[in-house]
Amino acid sequence: MSKNLYPALDLARFYQGKSVFVPGGAGFIGSHLVERLLALGARVQVLDNFQTGRRENLPQEVEIVEGCITSATLPAADLIFNLACPASPVHYQRDPIGTWKSSVLGALNILETARQTGARVIHSSTSEVYGDPLEHPQAETYWGNVNPVGRRACYDEGKRAAETLIMDYVRVHHVDARIPRIFNTYGPRMAIDDGRVVSNFIVQALTGQALTFYGDGTTTRSFCYVTDMVEALLRLGAVDGQAGCIVNLGNPAEFSLTELAQMVRRITGCDAPKSQSDRPVDDPKMRKPDISLAGEILNWAPRISLDKGLEMTVQHFKSRLVESGVKQPE
Ligand code: UDP
């Protein structure tokens, strides 16, 4: 039985009136986070370079500065939630040098700002730090199995280097920084061309195309609905005494790609065929978070099942496709 250290964490009380800076706030997870922060009464400022983020993801009234996290002068704030980095393999491999810079130089810029202003930093890291894991499920104590020179390395090693930097700023400069390792997250506002398996399968099913399997369908992932992820991030920002905390955030329910495809077919009502190509090089064969630490320190666990989350995501993609004039089969 885990200890619930923060059973009555009152997010509204914590965030009300706080100034919160969200680099990458126009992106998928960032925009959901901003929405919740506003609802909790925080004053929010967003920085985004719109490489993968979209203005339409955010309400009109949100202050957005267009700029790059590696070089922008950052505002003073009580908290910084750093979500500024492309996270889908298709996107982060398009400009690998830019990805590494966003991750490492972006973290450096934020940490220097936090050192001077005293801001608390929640820096989004990733399950990709575990690479193609040899331990399953993955706990925070696992050091990972990453190819440092492969095509995924710009993201994986970029995020690992950022983690190193953060921990050194915690130790040397006593910055209050925390590291959530975010596992596969899905939901409304993923980019239609995101390239990830959930958005690809849904868009393919809704537009009468074959579902593109990379490999034989036995690869596994554990998918977390975005509002569950945002709840965990907000909790990590609000708990005291967690400088240097590294914590897995994700939904431990694990599915093969074949199972995911079956669910997408059932929910969309489209009996889409499948096409198969080779697995990408260094593609992790399986992934599943051990979230016991998150349970202990955040009193959090995901609530939305994949079934329910996919239903909401399919509804969202249906309306986006209608808006963009893409024809869906009868
Ligand atoms: N994948 C797939 N078809 C697609 C997109 C992805 O079979 O159209 C596979 C991909 O090779 C990986 C898994 O689905 O094994 C999850 O990929 P995704 O890009 O969603 O996330 P990540 O690799 O970052 O976990």
Image (cartoon, helix red, strand yellow):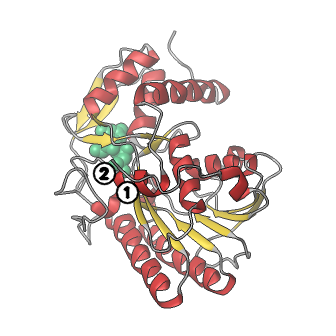
Q: Name the residue at 63% across, 70% down.
A: 68
Report if the CB atoms under discs 1 and 2 are less than 8 Å apart.
yes
Q: Is residue 52 visible?
A: no
Assess disc 1: are there few (<14), some (14-19) or many (≥20) residues with their C-alpha within 10 Å of its C-alpha: some
Q: Residue furthest right?
A: 61
**Amino acid of disc 1:** Leu
Percent coordinates x, y for residue 7 in the rendering: 53, 49
Q: Is residue 235 visible?
A: yes
Q: Which residue is mark 1?
A: 293
Answer above or below: position of 153 versus 14.
below
The label nearer to you, 1 versus 2, is: 1
For the residue labelled by badge 1, is the local secondary structure a helix, a strand or a loop? Answer: helix
Percent coordinates x, y for residue 177 in the rendering: 52, 73
Q: CA distance from mark 1 to mark 2?
A: 8 Å
Q: Residue furthest bottom?
A: 172
Return the mark for residue 212. Answer: none
Query: In terms of image quarters, where does ligand 1 lie?
Result: top left
**Disc 2 residue: CB within 8 Å of ligand 1:** no
Percent coordinates x, y for residue 231 in the rendering: 56, 47
Return the mark for residue 290. Answer: 2
Q: Quadrant of residue 122?
A: bottom right
Percent coordinates x, y for residue 312 in the rendering: 54, 27
Q: Residue furthest top?
A: 330
**Amino acid of disc 2:** Asp
Answer above or below: position of 299 versus 75.
above
> How many numbered markers are drawn?
2
Q: Name the residue at 44% across, 72% down.
A: 100
Q: Name the residue at 56% across, 29% down.
A: 317
Q: Residue furthest left?
A: 134
For the residue labelled by badge 2, is the local secondary structure a helix, a strand or a loop? Answer: loop
Q: Is residue 21 left or right of residue 296?
A: right
